[in-house]
Image (cartoon, helix red, strand yellow):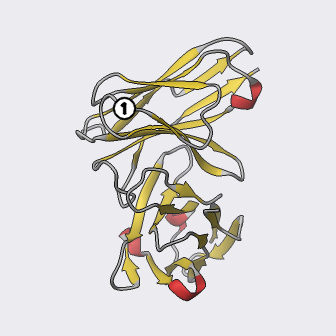
Amino acid sequence: NAGVTQTPKFQVLKTGQSMTLQCAQDMNHNSMYWYRQDPGMGLRLIYYSASEGTTDKGEVPNGYNVSRLNKREFSLRLESAAPSQTSVYFCASSELSGSGSDTQYFGPGTRLTVL
Amino acid sequence: AQSVTQPDIHITVSEGASLELRCNYSYGATPYLFWYVQSPGQGLQLLLKYFSGDTLVQGIKGFEAEFKRSQSSFNLRKPSVHWSDAAEYFCAVGPPGGFKTIFGAGTRLFVKA
């Protein structure tokens, strides 16, 4: 049982390049999330998917797109990377839909640098 | 506005000493409250959570937290810290019926021998 997996672990991009961060969970969870973590700011929600087939904006969605490919997979795409998107990105999942009481299970993160 | 404040950016304690990490929240109603821990290079792991009932909540690794409604606080405690507790700790609030969990900025714990 791998939990939440993310690829790649590290990535360096040049300004304007695009890339997709991949996330998969094997816990049969309904909800999935993408966060970014910046020093002194904790985690900020980029997008979430309450259930398969739905996605919604979080606190900082600008510059990102997401796809909930199926129940297991939730990808995050940067269409034209900017230095301000240099961050550590975490994917998470939770079992229930629509409950703020859910425990979230996190992947190990992707460290992205945009030059 | 909804917010979570962790007043201490970092704390250093000696191994075997007690620990208290502070967390204050601002929310219209009583939210769900969480403490997560992040070891270096890892994702976050849940330590404990509070929904209702007994205001003293027990978690994993010997941690506990106390919810104080009058102070809008949810402080994390441990009676005796071990070197392996060195990590970053995040307090979070989850809105009832929603998805947008709000995380505090985190408190980094250093443990000295």
Side of B37 where A87 appears, left or right: right
Residue drawn at x 29%, y 25% as measured from the top left: A70
Residue drawn at x 72%, y 53% as measured from the top left: A40
Camera-nearest residue between A88 and A63: A63
Which residue lies under the disc numbered 1? A54
- Find the residue positioned furthest to the top: A17
Side of B59 where A40 appears, left or right: right
- The x and y percentages for residue A87 are 66, 35
Quarter holding residue A106: top left
- Find the residue positioned furthest to the bottom: B70
Quarter holding residue A51: top left
Side of A51 where B44 appears, left or right: right
Q: Which quadrant would the C terminus of chain B be assigned to in this image?
A: bottom right
- The x and y percentages for residue B22 are 61, 75
Count of labels in the image: 1
Residue drawn at x 58%, y 26% as measured from the top left: A64
Residue drawn at x 54%, y 41% as measured from the top left: A58
Side of B24 where B57 appears, left or right: left
